[in-house]
Every structure is written in C-alpha cells, then in structure tokens.
Image (cartoon, grey):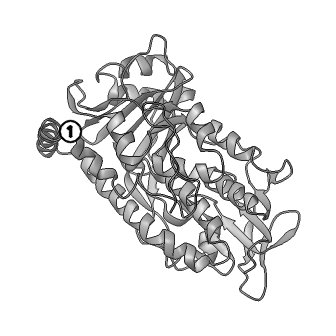
C-alpha cells in the first residue's frame, strides 16, 4: 500500500473525522462520506481522558479542546440518598496520567475536527459501503448513490451497526445487548452548582456533570429488557426511576423537557473481530470494538484508533496488531465494570458500597489504578504530551 494516496472515510463522527484529519496532515487526499444530512452528532457530551487528549495533540487539536472543555474537578461516587462512597482527586489524576479529564459537547469536538479538513472534504447526505476491499495489487472500491470511488485506503468509521464490518466479516455475530439502557440530556439548570458525581443504586446509575458553558450534562442507565420504551415519555420514566434521588437530580429533571431526553439501548462486541482490517479497509471506533460506556472510553478509543491508523496507514496489519489487544482488554474491563455498577441485588450492592467506602478511606488513590494502562497511553509519535499541568505550567514534551 502506498504511504500516501487517496483515502475515503465512511462516517463523519468523532473517529472518522479524527482519522481524516490525521491522514490529511500526513499528505493523504481525504474524502469523508457521512450518510446524515449534517455533521451534528446524535448525543450530548463526551469525556476525554489524557490518553485521547494526547492523541488530539498529534493533529494539533489538543490544546484547543482543553481550552473549550470543562475540567472534571473533584467529585466522586454517591448513593441515592446522597452519601459519598468515594471522593475523586482531580489533581492527583492529572499528575498520575499527565493531564486532566475534561468534558465538552460532542458538537464542539466535531466542529474542531472538521475545521482541520479542506472545505470540500466532507460530503454529507452520502451513504456508502465497501464494494470491494481491494488488496496489495488493486484499490478498494466504495459505492455511493452517485458514483463508485476508488481508494488506496478506506477507513470504516460507520458506528456500532457498521455495514462495512458486516461486509468484511460476514460470519461474525456482531453486537450483543449489554443488559441495560441509557438516557442522556444536556440542558441549562438554573442555579446549578455542584460537584461532578456518579450515583449507584440497585440496577441503576445516574451521573451529573457541569459544563464550561453553564449547562449540565446528565446521564442515567438501568437494567431493563432490550427495546423498551416509556409508556408516556422518557422524562416521565426518569422521574419514576430517579425522582427521589439526592440533589441535584430532582432539579435537573425539573429543568428537562421530554424532548431533551435521549434514550438508547447499549450494545457491545463481545466476540472480538478476527482483525481490524481486510485488504485496504480499516475499521475504527465502534465499528471495530463497540464497548459499554462504563469506563467512558468509547470515543477516546476511537480517537486513539484514528491517530494510530494514520501512523500505520501503509501497513494495516501493524494497525491491527497495535490496536486489537488494547481495545479488547479495555472492552472486557468495561463489561466487568458494568456488572459491578449495575448490580441489581440490594444485599450485594450493600457489600459493594461498604467495600468502596472502606477503600476510599484507607487508600483514596487506589481508585486511580483502574485507569492505569488506559489513561497513561501515549501515541506512537510526538507531539503528544499534555501541555498543561494542574498548576498551569507547560512541561517539556516527551519523546517516544
């Protein structure tokens, strides 16, 4: 495969746009095909950990995103009554992993990524699929309603229901239901002032996080059969499930309108794909390794995929070798985390909560170990060091 050439990216989400920006930076002629009429993402906010911020540094977007995002400061884990089970130390996390955890609207990130591409690089309203993955002797072919495109590299970033994945690996079982559904909302909340927190109840969780622009990002998840919907509306469903939980949950729900609430069942890839590439086609993000959101790493891993793919664009076997073991391990860790925080039994939950509280008191920094091997990842090329330390200094960048 040529070191540069024509790349076609199927999917204009975070993973696809990051891959397009990274390839464009390396001299590839890039075309992004997005089936939706615009790039406005379905979703609310996204948390970015030091690992993905370092990946964004590679394409020159890291500092801009840090400036646009809100830093997730000290908060912690609570019970529905409001009792703190564990407190987080944002400065300790930043020192340990080389930067903070930040939160921003997905649309802000998408806008920043798209701005790094030529004006004519993105074609919206253009569904696409792989007609031929190609090989070392012939280009790949991508079918669209208007024409068929040839490409030296195809990046499939078409999400959890990836049609390209089905073409490349028709015998793979695809995704499975993770056992729970999620709700998300991003709204202004009058008088909101609180510490970021996640709250665990029997078979249910809730998270509340203030954003830099004054809005609040909240999410919830509950163990429920797949395909369920509220008999009235999803705000009413949230009130039934979480309306009597601690402040600020009732205030957030009071400020929400039914149309503000997004609901989606959670699915993940339980059986890893045999590879993340075939021929001249590479899968990134959810198309390759959809995982539960319990570690907050789905979008982060898509960003990592993108910069590693650009680095190995001439050798897709090296891309698979670099990404498959890591994302498989993180996905399995996310599944284990879901079993822990979505426990339905009250007795088991009480034991879990007591253990969390005891560990938090005895060794508060022990919780950071769960992010070791995840948040401390570094891309295969510089620049990638988080520029800003908690006290505002700018350390020297590391070299690999």
* Residue 276 seen: no
Q: Which is nearer the eye, 158 or 60?
A: 60
Q: Outermost residue, bottom direction?
A: 137
Q: Quadrant of the N terminus?
A: bottom right
Q: Residue at x 29, y 24 (%)?
A: 245
Q: Residue at x 50, y 68 (%)?
A: 323
Q: Classify mark 1: helix, strand or loop.
A: helix
Residue tagged 1: 364
Q: Relative to 114, does residue 318 appear above or below in the rendering?
A: below
Q: Where does residue 300 sit, x and y in percent of width and height?
A: 50, 51
Q: Where does residue 86 sit, x and y in percent of width and height?
A: 22, 34
Q: Which is nearer the eye, 3 or 35?
A: 3
Q: Residue at x 14, y 35 (%)?
A: 361
Q: Which is nearer the eye, 324 or 232?
A: 324
Q: Where does residue 116 sit, x and y in percent of width and height?
A: 74, 47
Q: Is residue 56 left or right of residue 246?
A: right
Q: Relative to 188, does residue 289 appear above or below in the rendering?
A: below
Q: Outermost residue, top direction?
A: 191
Q: Where does residue 49 sit, x and y in percent of width and height?
A: 46, 45
Q: Which is nearer the eye, 86 or 253?
A: 86
Label total for image: 1
Q: Quadrant of residue 194?
A: top left
How packed is label 1: few (under 14 Cα within 10 Å), some, or many (20 or more)? some
Q: Relative to 18, does residue 81 appear above or below in the rendering?
A: above
Q: Residue at x 35, y 41 (%)?
A: 93
Q: Is residue 93 left or right of residue 131?
A: left
* Residue 168 seen: yes
Q: Is residue 102 left or right of residue 158?
A: left
């Amino acid at each position: 495969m040529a070191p540069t050439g024509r790349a076609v990216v199927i999917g204009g989400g975070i993973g696809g746009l990051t891959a397009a920006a990274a390839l464009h930076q390396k001299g590839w002629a890039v075309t992004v095909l997005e089936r939706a009429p615009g790039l406005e993402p379905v979703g609310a906010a996204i948390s970015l950990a030091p690992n993905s911020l370092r990946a964004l540094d590679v394409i020159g977007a890291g500092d801009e995103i840090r400036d646009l995002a809100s830093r997730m400061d000290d908060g912690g884990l609570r019970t529905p009554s409001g009792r703190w089970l564990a407190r987080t130390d944002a400065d300790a996390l930043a020192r340990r992993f080389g930067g903070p955890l930040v939160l921003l609207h997905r649309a802000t990130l998408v806008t920043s990524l798209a701005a790094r591409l030529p004006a004519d690089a993105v074609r919206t309203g253009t569904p696409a699929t792989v007609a031929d993955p190609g090989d070392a002797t012939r280009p790949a072919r991508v079918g669209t309603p208007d024409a068929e495109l040839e490409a030296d590299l195809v990046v499939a970033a078409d999400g959890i229901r990836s049609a390209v994945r089905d073409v490349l690996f028709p015998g793979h079982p695809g995704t499975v239901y993770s056992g729970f559904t999620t709700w998300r909302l991003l709204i202004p909340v009058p008088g909101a002032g609180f510490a970021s927190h996640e709250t665990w109840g029997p078979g249910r969780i809730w998270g509340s996080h203030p954003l830099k622009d004054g809005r609040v990002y909240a999410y919830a998840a509950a163990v429920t059969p797949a395909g369920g919907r509220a008999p009235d509306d999803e705000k009413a469903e949230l009130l039934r499930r979480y309306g009597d939980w601690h402040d600020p949950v009732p205030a957030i729900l009071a400020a929400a309108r039914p149309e503000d609430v997004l609901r989606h069942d959670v699915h993940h890839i339980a059986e890893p794909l045999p590879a993340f590439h075939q021929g001249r086609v590479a899968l990134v993000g959810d198309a390759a390794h959809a995982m539960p959101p319990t570690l907050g790493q789905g979008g982060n891993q898509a960003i990592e995929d993108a910069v590693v793919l650009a680095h190995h664009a001439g050798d897709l076997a090296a891309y698979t070798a670099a990404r498959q073991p890591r994302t498989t391990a993180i996905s399995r860790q996310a599944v284990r985390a879901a079993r822990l925080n979505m426990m339905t039994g009250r007795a088991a939950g009480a034991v879990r909560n007591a253990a969390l509280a005891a560990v938090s008191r005895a060794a508060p920094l022990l919780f950071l170990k769960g992010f070791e091997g995840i948040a401390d990842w570094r891309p295969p090329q510089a620049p990638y060091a988080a520029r800003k330390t908690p006290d505002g200094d700018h350390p020297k960048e590391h070299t690999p």
